[in-house]
Amino acid sequence: PGTNIIEFRTPGYRWGVTNLLLSNHLLVPGIPDGGSYGTAFGSGHSTVLTMGFENTGIDTVLSVTGHDIDWFGEIEVYLNGVLLGSLSVSPQDAPNAGDAFLILASQQLPGINIIEFRTPGYHWGVQDLLLSSQ
């Protein structure tokens, strides 16, 4: 219900944003996310997937399975704009063995924290997302 507006502004400069995919839900600690996201799963040609989670107050692990990751660094994972690391390589059109990223309580902002999966625009996907306590 209602209208949500996202604005990007930089007065006096010419620029643009393309291929941005926003997720409309939060990851809930301890509850597996059943979604499959990215171009490998028909989510358009997005180069950024954004998801959120509420501050856990404790050290937390983000587990995720990458799909069709051809080279290390193809998908970078960020927390609130700070690089956590990259997804490991996977076979062509198949999942990798899974990755885990430690998110310290001290790295989390009060309220909603933002996780981003960024790629230069290749065929890619993520699935099996889970936040769990350390």
Image: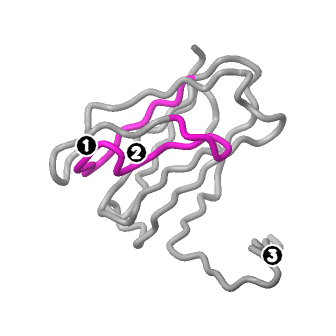
* Left or right of 107, for residue 70: left
Residue position marked by numbered label 2 in the rendering: 127
Residue position marked by numbered label 1 in the rendering: 95
- Give coordinates of residue 29: x percent, y percent: 62, 29
Position of 13 relative to 37 (above/below): below
Pick the quarter of the image with the N terminus: bottom right
Residue position marked by numbered label 3 in the rendering: 3
* Left or right of 51, for residue 57: right
In percent of the image, x 31 and y 37: which residue is there?
88
In percent of the image, x 42 and y 36: which residue is there?
64
Q: Residue furthest left?
A: 92
Identity of the amino acid at label 1?
Answer: Pro
- Give coordinates of residue 69: x percent, y percent: 27, 49
The residue range painted magenta reads 61-84
Among numbered discs 2 and 1, the one appearing first in the sequence: 1
Cα separation between marks 3 and 2 = 28 Å
Q: Residue furthest front?
A: 12
Among numbered discs 1 and 3, the one appearing first in the sequence: 3
Q: Are marks 2 and 1 in contact (CB under 8 Å)?
A: yes
